[in-house]
Image (cartoon, helix red, strand yellow):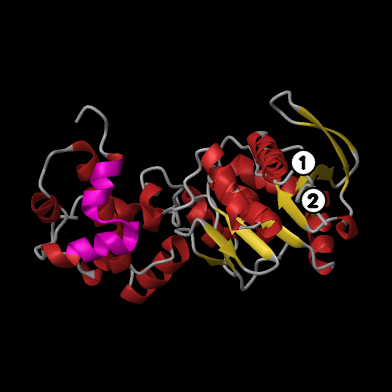
Amino acid sequence: MALRIGILVHESAMPSTVTAPLDTLRTANKLAHVLNPGAPPPLSARLVAARAGTVRLAQGVSFEAELARPDELDVLLVSAIDYNNVGDLCRRLDNLVAERVLLRRCAEAGLRIATTCNAMLLLAEAGLLDGRRATTSWWLANLVRERYPAVELAVEEMLIDDGDIITAGASTAAYELVLQMVEWAGGKGLAHNVSRLMLVDRERQSQAPYISMALAQRPRQGLSERAEKWLQKRLHETISVRDLADHCRVSERTLLRRFHEDFGATPLEYVQKLRVERAKALLETTHLSFEEIVGRCGYQDVSSFRRLFKQVVSMTPNDYRGRYRLRGR
């Protein structure tokens, strides 16, 4: 029997997170037929919604969707939200009331629910991720920590399969998520061949190499913003929690609490991430040796910084430079 997948469409959906999974699943069925002409298709995909009918998106795209019925599906894939800014994203989340009710019904029915990109926030809004590990678009990490503190966020991970809930990271991680469904239905061989046809690199296991703190959504509360500006100017120096607390005019205990709330890290852990971020930028844009870069990032021990870099980025500095150095440099 085919794996029955419903792609949840809503008025704020990002069109590509509807059409790309459909294309991938159809490609999988076509390839399965080529490889085994007599066998039934391993996958069945349909567009579903909280209400049956035409779903019109802001971009002028429309989809015809049937009413989502949990007993007629094995997997519900939730499309991501198209938004202009964080405030707009939060308003759209607030407005998707019928979709939150549907998601809770699906969870109660034991349906497997999958999200890609920021659709994870809709599950969190429905209360389905409290106490559970999840990932999402890396640039929304701070928003998730602030808005959904009960979620165990692991934003560096590309995909987290937590049994009945599967979350995937930003944009192209959707392909890995859909290929995981192809593997459930048709086996590793079919998933591997589909990934080859579509030029999808299934070796990627982490979002970490792609994370840019300069592009991430950040808290804009006075203390956090003031602390980060102070740190950015002193990454080449020895930094203590006491000095940072004094600059922010708070106790060390208050500073630790606020950093945990806003950044999900201690001040010193955050400094390490900032230093790795500086190293990434220098590896991308300069011909400086790694030893010179380490000095500009406030470290003296090259070996320990190399270990830190690999721990944070999931790649060695040499591999990172080879893959992400700007062309022409």
Residue 133 screen position, x and y as percent: 57, 68
* Contact between labelled residues 2 and 1, with CB atoms less than 8 Å apart: yes
Q: Which residues are magenta?
A: 305-323
Residue under the point 75% across and 51% down: 42
Kindly identify which residue carries mark 2: 99
Crowding at mark 1 (Cα within 10 Å: few <14, some 14-19, many 20+): many
Which residue does the numbered mark 1 point to in the structure image?
10
| Residue at the spot 66% in from the left edge and 69% down from the top edge | 163
Count of labels shown? Answer: 2
Q: Extreme bottom residue here? A: 253
Residue at 89% of width from left, 60% of height from top?
71
Q: Which SS class for mark 1?
A: loop
Q: Residue at x 72, y 51 (%)?
A: 77
95 vs 190, left or right, is right
Question: Is tag 1's residue or tag 2's residue first in the polypeptide sequence?
Answer: 1
Amino acid residing under circle 2: Glu
Q: Which mark is residue 235?
A: none
**Observer-nearest of 315 and 148:** 315
Q: Amino acid at mark 1?
A: His
Can you give x and y, in whole percent of width and height, for residue 32 in the image?
Answer: 69, 45
Report if residue 166 lies within the magenta region.
no
Q: Is residue 111 above or below residue 192?
A: below
Q: Position of residue 164 (x, y in %)?
A: 70, 67
